[in-house]
Amino acid sequence: MDPDRWDRLEQIVRKVVREELDRRKQKREAKQQIKLNGKGWQGIDDELVATWKAAYPLVDIREHLSLAAAWCRSNVDKAPRSQYARFVNCWLRREQNSRAAKQIPKAGAGPMKCSKCGDDKAASYRRTRDGNLCPKCLGEQSEN
Ligand SMILES: [Zn+2]
């Protein structure tokens, strides 16, 4: 064959390969399309759930997928009409952050019991050499 025919052949092969890759890409994107139907989410595969589980370890993903779906169906005006993956991701991140915040002890909160009288109803306790003391025991101590 002459060089021109090789060129043409190469162009045809490239075109076919490109079309095939495009078709596969479209198929993949169609598969990744998440939809909301009467029963809940459609198109969320195990791989995506695993990704969310790894990113948001404090969140029960399946539970919150149901909650998010229920929210969408109950708040039609506010619910997104597309980009559901983004919406669910934000939902899960918010839940993760809220749970993480609850796990952090509040600043200044120490063991809530007086080491001297055992009182556990006071609003605050101060850490001293004698342990954590309630305001009453602190007062008595300073008088001594
Ligand atoms: Zn006390």
Image (spheres, helix red, strand yellow):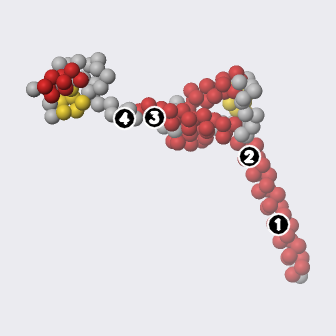
- Residue highlighted by disc 1: 13
Disc nearer the start of the sequence (3/1): 1
Counting residues from the start of the chain, the first of labels 3 and 4 encountered is: 3
In this rendering, position of residue 64 left or right of residue 12:
left
Query: Distance of mark 2 from mark 4, alpha carbons?
Result: 47 Å
Nearer the observer: mark 3 or 4; the answer is 4
Q: CA distance from mark 2 to mark 1?
A: 24 Å
Q: CA distance from mark 1 to mark 4?
A: 67 Å
Residue at mark 4: 107
Q: Give the mark nearer the N terminus: 1 vs 4.
A: 1
Q: Residues within 10 Å of mark 3 (few under 14, many from 20)?
A: few
At a point 60% along the width and 34% down the height, the residue shown is 91
- 72 lies left or right of 120: right
Name the quadrant of the N terminus.
Answer: bottom right
Secondary structure type for disc 1: helix
Which residue is depicted at the point 24% across and 23% down? 135
Q: CA distance from mark 3 to mark 4?
A: 12 Å
